[in-house]
Amino acid sequence: MDAFCFLAAVVVSVSGWGSEDSIPQVDIDTQNRVFQELWGERFVWKYDSLPSEGSAPEFRMPYAGYIYPDSIGGTYRSLRKYDQAFYPGRGPAEAFEWSDIAAHKQVVTRQVRQGNRRFGSRLVTVRSYGTPYWHGHCNGWAAAAIRHGEPQRSVTKNGVVFAPSDIKSLLAELYTYSEIVDLGGENYGNVHPGTLHAVLANWLGRHAHPIGMEAMPGREKWNYPIYGFSTSATKRSEGRHVEVRMELKYVLNISREQDQAPQNGRTKYFHYLLNLDAAGNIVGGYYYRDSSQIDLLWVARYPLAGGQEGNEQGNPHLKVSDVLALWRASVDKDTVAKWVNIEPVPKKRSSIAQTPIPADSVVRADPDAADAR
């Protein structure tokens, strides 16, 4: 997935973006509106005004987390502890996790070889009813790692000890179904190269704010946090076209949750041509054959309680305030104080497309972090 090579330039994209493909209008409208609402600033489309690289500061690099596969019970272990601390003698949060996993089982197919060496063998498709191996909480981990520093110490609540790994698991559960802000790709398929370039340059280049990506086009969904990018470029056709090579930095998941995760950074390579209008704004483009492509760019919102609008499928027995309090108690106050998240949290929360955010509540770095994390 991460290997790359430099091939001869070919003007045909894997996803079908052609040489005349314009950025979808829904992307232009969305980026202009969302960036203004979240940052209080205009989204920049002019190529020469955009940074060629950007990265989250070292202190807020997303931590490598676990996807908590549904096939082995998802986050049930940490939810069992949560129940012991907050619902003694009962187990509603864990029970909800098991019921949610059961509700998402489906027909699973796999190829197995039958026969022997003497009489020959052949591949046979075997079908069973179960949980696909890729079902889990990767988007929940990615959102939590973007919005929260890695827990550093254990926290005791009502006699129950929550290790950093337990707190990370609860954070992943909290965000798994909570709504996100679509930054490109959801409405039409793979992210347009013009959108990819502009979003990374505005979010990471201008504001050093990590974002999430759904990394693999297709049925399987794998989400990771992006923390940096760098580009090299060559202008062509009197400056109306720009050939760009980009290296995108992201964090890969680990094979099990750990109290202190190892660094697990990876790189994706992109190669694309951008079309510029007479004013130098990015208006279109296409990928070259040797380029990676991704399904979706997104950023997580402040988590909502399960069962509410915006998190209808979330665990209704897991309280946002409880989980965030555990996290705050597990990290240093100076980390919380300098941590900046976009905070689209209007009093009456509905669609971000319809609810303007007051300029004075766009970005917070609240030392108490009671509502801003």
Image (cartoon, rainbow, N blue to C red):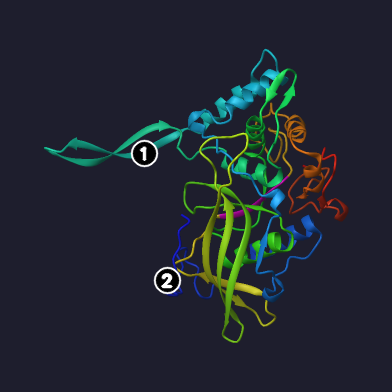
Label at residue 228: none
Q: Nearer the viewer, residue 17 or 373?
A: 373
The residue shown at (70%, 81%) is 279
Residue at the disc numbered 1? 109
The reply to whether callout 1 and callout 2 are in contact (CB within 8 Å) is no
The residue shown at (63%, 73%) is 283
Q: Please, what is the three-letter code of the amino acid marked with disc 2?
A: Leu
Label at residue 7: 2
Q: Main secondary structure of the magenta part?
A: strand
The residue shown at (81%, 59%) is 40
Residue 32 visible? The answer is yes
Q: Position of residue 350 (x, y in %)?
A: 75, 45
Left or right of 274 in this view: 280: right
Q: Quadrant of the C terminus?
A: top right
Q: Residue furthest bottom?
A: 238
- Which of the two discs, 1 and 2, sits closer to the camera? 2
Q: Secondary structure at mark 2?
A: loop
Q: Position of residue 257 (x, y in %)?
A: 57, 35
Which range is magenta?
296-301
Is 299 colored magenta in this rendering?
yes
Identify the mark nearer the N-term, 1 or 2: 2
Q: Is residue 216 above or below residue 176?
A: below
Q: In which quadrant of the rendered view does residue 324 lie?
A: top right
Is 367 colored magenta in this rendering?
no
Q: Nearer the viewer, residue 221 or 147?
A: 147
Residue 23 visible? The answer is no
Q: Nearer the viewer, residue 286 or 209?
A: 209
Count residues near mark 1 (Cα–Cα under 10 Å), then give few for <14, some for 14-19, many for 20+.
Answer: few
